[in-house]
């Protein structure tokens, strides 16, 4: 059966920076404390929205070490070991484990083109080299290949994977994976990264969620998980719909795209809510400013978050 | 005017490994010596076909150091500083310069989604942080964004870029870039990475080429550059057509894809030609074997390379 | 408020052919009668799985006329007017209306590249030219552009669109559309085409579904709609999971892809179930045969459909 | 050997419309006469830039009939029979032949997803049904699949295809096709649609070109073909570079994309040059106006075309 430590709401934590590019530890600590207070079930450090690919190895180590200190064993800490190919991923994993990761999260290889055989060999090699629960992170928008549900189920059944974090946007594949995982005795935790349709993912049988928006409103996602567990679908839907209104911080801005629009909106909201001191981004991404900040303020205000 | 050190034939060097994943220095040295003997104008270390994304930082350092030792100043050494985003790329660049790189080659940021503004900011930041000629490596098949020719020309005119290595497969954009670079006083070296149509790239005005296939037949590419310089287009075409027959080592295999098919074919050919001791690949890619090796032998034989 | 005629289960009807490429009217009639008997709320003729792009105009007319005759007003008949650009789509629409369509279903323009302004102008022009409820068919896998939910909501509010058939696979956009449509007073019927996750779509607030798999088991989809209306989510999920097992007729075959794998599996299943006389496909697609037919028989058997 | 009627410069003709959407025969005739006077070797009617997918069948017939009347046998007339799948393409082909087409040009099937087997079966079926030289039109940007060079060569060797019009942007595949066609005894005419790199295509061995820009400057393309035939590559390059300056009519506009930017620029240029009475486009595309028209005028002026 899937490891119970890895179910429920596990936000991918957004990192706070100072305007000169240093880790802003005080701001970061406020945000993590707030999510733990809200009752999240785990924290995912160095995910795609956690600056993992923008951070040098030294900085990655600092983020893991500070997270470990702050979390202090209250909830499990999952750590993203995102790098291009197998040997580099394993190296990231070794350092993460030395620094106290409770579980590791790896994507398919990227940059060099691989077929499905290489992707499967990659997860097997990473699992073999690292003594910790391993999650497959399915995020084709970043790595440009989709993890097949049949392969994921096979790796789960064999004990290679402890779970899957699905940010693929492919709800059909997600559903097949959930049904197959159940048939196999539920070896994996299947988590959705799609913060806008978490209620539907729970309905389908997801074991939890990894919603970036929980950095802004962890309380709502914690409540929704409770409603889903209790089968109170009407309340779950209402909570999701409320959170979706808040999610328009992503689309009220203009002239920003990709990471700058998404994580940029998170940081700006956290700044406006007094949790982060700054909405600074790491190069080459610029912080949101001017009318975009005001537009995000408008959404937060309308949602009663200020 | 474009730096004359970076024109002509600059092969992206394929790396030799032992079956247990170590750098096979003796094989690697044989291959580099052979290319220098053939008269290549430079060597590009840690390019996409040079295992850059498969190598840990430690191994990258080893490859650069050994290359430096072998090349010994006879031709310029360009080094790929391929990593996900700006700070990580700069860190790769610093180490490469300490180890003796003559020029650096960086792609657009990848994994996290960026718009053109971020890509331009990225190259400016990398240039500012690193005191060496910087080449932009346009390789959308790996990084999933195309470098716009107007941006490249602008960065060339301002001295940010010393050149472009084009592996985009977009010959229209390549042509516009060449014409614009000429109008601006030819500040950049424009190199093509498309080994199959190098003659045509020279006709359009390219300053050189970065052909992976020159690992197999450097002599042919060196001759073709000479013919093009002399305006002997008929001979250049014949040379290219001969090399293209040899390039079928890429497509006579079956069941292998992507990096395993491309670089795998290079390594297998070098092994069959007695230059590499092994055609081993780094994880998660498997070496070619059995009928695929025989198919490649057949192509080499038909082309008189054995 | 959304037109009540266009809610619930509206299968996209699969067409029966004779082996020599003629419409097999007897088989087609059996299938339509079976779906109407099962209690479907409407039928969608000449959808993507209804051979629309494989059929000449003459054949399209025949399919509409026969469908009209068979349906005989018992449920509404929606007709796909799929063609490349505005004037051709309008022409398809005029003929469909003359032949008795109750509503029309059009995609974004395709083949020639268009931006969002052209797509919006297209739907406005089609609506203006044709006096019937118009559905936007969002199917990027076929037309290679995604319909933005803000545009769809705007066209709904203005009375241009009566509804949306969503086959985009983008559940986030689908959710935003449902919430926005609700805020605007629910002018449109929002239907999902994703047969595997219909329960989740109903949970989100979808007004109905257009499941191809309802050609095989209309009873299950009709029951699921009832459960969802009654808030009996546990039963809805169980029904969906059962239908999903049946859906493996799509992925037990080998050597067939795209339309041949999808619609080919539908036709083969209908043949094995005795509803169609043949599983013939129109050129250039070949009918499934041999082991693929047996594999589909195995799935049907395991699901108690034989 | 390739049919000599289908070599050299064969422009895809741009169609003239009146502002109320009628064919502007007088303007169209001026443009065709001008191209024939310039010495083009053929004319390609109803290509992607010839409004084929925007035109109803009735209008397509009118365009073919008027073209036939105007051309009057002076050069061969190739006609695009662009439609979604096999039966519809054959129907377009029958009508085109009745109206006097000398050769037919068909793409891969589109809208419904097909694999390479279906694409090959499609060309075989179209060839079998239509008694005329058949060209394969390789245009993945519109049909979203690439025609493999091995398949094209095979179909050429068997007499299914008389030639290929390559608008794929894949110069590597194009080169392989040319070499393979030569080895097979040159059964096909291989034509490039990439107007910006025609000189390079001729160097590689292309049998001709189908440049949209020849609607604006047919004289330049005719001269370039002559230079290439004579091996005067320096002159060919200069001609191409001059034409490329003219091609910036595509990228000096803003707020227009795709077909509206490309064919819109052609029509606007022809209007400014006094050849077309209007730059009207068919729905849903709007004609260029205001500053965009002035920007195009600026390019034409700088190139001495006014």
Image: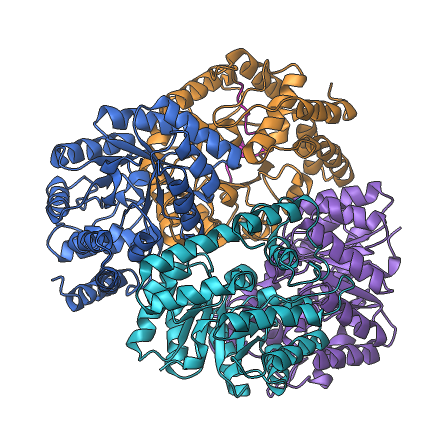
Chain colours: A purple, B cyan, C orange, D blue
Q: Is residue D117 left or right of residue B69?
A: left
* Residue positioned most to the top: C26
Q: Is residue B159 above or below residue D99?
A: below
**Picture coordinates of residue D292 (x, y %)?**
24, 63
Prevailing secondary structure of the magenta residues = loop
Q: Is residue C2 magenta?
A: yes
In which quadrant of the rendered image does the C terminus of chain D lie? bottom left
User: Measured along the vertical axis of the image, is residue D14 above or below residue B2?
Assistant: above
Report the magenta residues as a range. C1-16
Which quadrant holds residue D158?
A: top left
Q: Is residue B245 left or right of residue C304?
A: left
Q: Is residue B54 magenta?
A: no
Q: Nearer the viewer, residue B80 or A172?
A: B80
**Viewer-side residue, C180 vs C43:** C43
In which quadrant is the N terminus of chain D drawn?
top left
In the rendered view, does C191 fall on the left or right side of C241? left
Residue drawn at x 38%, y 23% as measured from the top left: D128
How many discs appear? 0
Residue C222, percent across and down?
66, 28
Quick one: C203 or C145, which is closer to the camera?
Answer: C145
Residue B48 in which image quadrant? bottom right
**Horizontal and vertical percent for residue C133?**
43, 35
Q: Nearer the viewer, residue A301 or D296?
A: D296
In the figure, is residue A46 to the left or right of C161?
right
Residue B107 visible: no
- Residue at left offset 42%, top offset 33%: D155
| Residue C25, image x, y percentages | 51, 13
- Viewer can see residue B135: yes
Name the quadrant containing residue D220.
bottom left
């Amino acid at each position: 059966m899937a490891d119970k430590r890895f179910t429920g709401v596990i936000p991918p934590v957004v990192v706070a920076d100072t305007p000169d590019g240093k880790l802003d530890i005080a701001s970061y600590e406020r945000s993590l404390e707030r999510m733990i207070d809200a009752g999240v079930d785990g924290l995912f450090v160095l995910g795609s929205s956690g600056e993992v690919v923008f951070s040098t190895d030294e900085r990655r180590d600092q983020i893991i070490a500070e997270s470990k200190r702050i979390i202090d064993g209250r909830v499990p800490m999952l750590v993203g070991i995102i790098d291009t190919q197998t040997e580099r991923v394993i190296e990231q994993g070794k350092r993460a484990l030395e620094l106290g990761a409770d579980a590791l999260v790896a994507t398919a290889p990227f940059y060099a083109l691989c077929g499905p055989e290489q992707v499967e060999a990659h997860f097997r090699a990473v699992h073999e080299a690292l003594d910790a629960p391993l999650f497959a992170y399915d995020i084709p928008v970043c790595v440009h290949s989709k993890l097949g549900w049949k392969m994921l189920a096979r790796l789960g059944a064999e004990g290679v994977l402890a779970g899957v974090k699905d940010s693929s946007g492919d709800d059909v594949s997600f559903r097949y994976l959930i049904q197959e995982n159940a048939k196999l005795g539920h070896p994996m935790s299947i988590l959705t990264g799609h913060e806008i349709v978490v209620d539907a993912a729970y309905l389908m049988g997801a074991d939890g969620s990894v919603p970036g928006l929980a950095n802004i409103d962890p309380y709502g996602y914690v409540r929704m998980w409770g409603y889903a567990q209790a089968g109170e679908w009407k309340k779950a839907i209402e909570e999701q719909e409320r959170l979706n209104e808040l999610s328009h911080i992503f689309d009220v801005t203009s002239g920003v795209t990709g990471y700058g629009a998404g994580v940029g909106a998170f940081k700006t909201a956290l700044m406006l809510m007094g949790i982060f001191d700054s909405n600074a981004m790491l190069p080459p991404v610029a912080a949101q400013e001017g009318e975009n900040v005001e537009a995000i303020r408008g959404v937060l205000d309308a949602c009663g978050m200020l």
